[in-house]
Amino acid sequence: MICPYCATPDDKVVDSRIAEEGRAIRRRRECLGCGRRYTTFERAEEVPLLVLKRSGAEEPYVADKVVEGIRMACKNRPVTEAEITTLADDVEEAMRVYPERPVPTSEIGREVLERLRHLDEVAYLRFASVYKDFQELDDFERELGILLKKSPPKGADIPPPAH
């Protein structure tokens, strides 16, 4: 490291600690030229996440696009902004560990759908209609049938009234 005070390239580390919840290392350094101390932080370089579009083009992953798609599907639904953000963060985290590079947009959409299914079924259908490019009413009926098969009926967990 170059000393920020005298520009001497020689220093010694006098203390190292984990910082930022384990995402960085804080180092206290002492310049061997002027004797002053300063702090540096060491962080892992973030590898950009690339997305493979249906057209075959590659582009950087943009979390805001995913958030906006989820937000549009959840419009006028009882879904909070925090739930939308958490869902988008979970999708991004899943894509970072996805074994294929670049990540196909179809995988991102599938991951969003899987999470929306558990969050809000109407938002799920809205997102599916765009993601799966519904063209006819039959497309909605087919998807609704799939959704109903995988979801327990409303009130299924409520025991019947005692007589």
Image: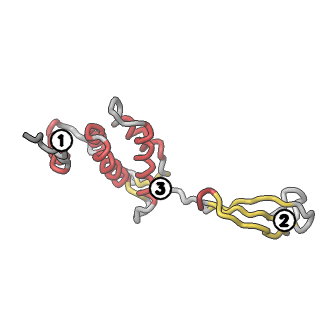
**Above or below — where is 46 with respect to 10?**
above
Q: 17 left or right of 98?
A: right
- The amino acid pointed to by label 1 is Gly
Q: Secondary structure at mark 3?
A: strand
For marks 3 and 1, give the one nearer the viewer: 1
Residue position for label 3? 50
Mark 3 Cα shell of 10 Å, populated few (<14), some (14-19), many (≥20): some
Residue behind mark 2: 30
Residue 138, position as x, y percentages in the image: 14, 39
Q: Which residue is mark 1?
A: 155
Q: Nearer the viewer, residue 70 or 136?
A: 70
Using the rendered image of the protein, determine whether residue 108 is visible from the camera's viewpoint.
Answer: yes
The answer to whether mark 3 and mark 2 are in CB contact below 8 A is: no
Q: Quadrant of residue 123?
A: top left
Q: Residue furthest left?
A: 163
Three-letter code for the amino acid on which mark 2 is drawn: Glu
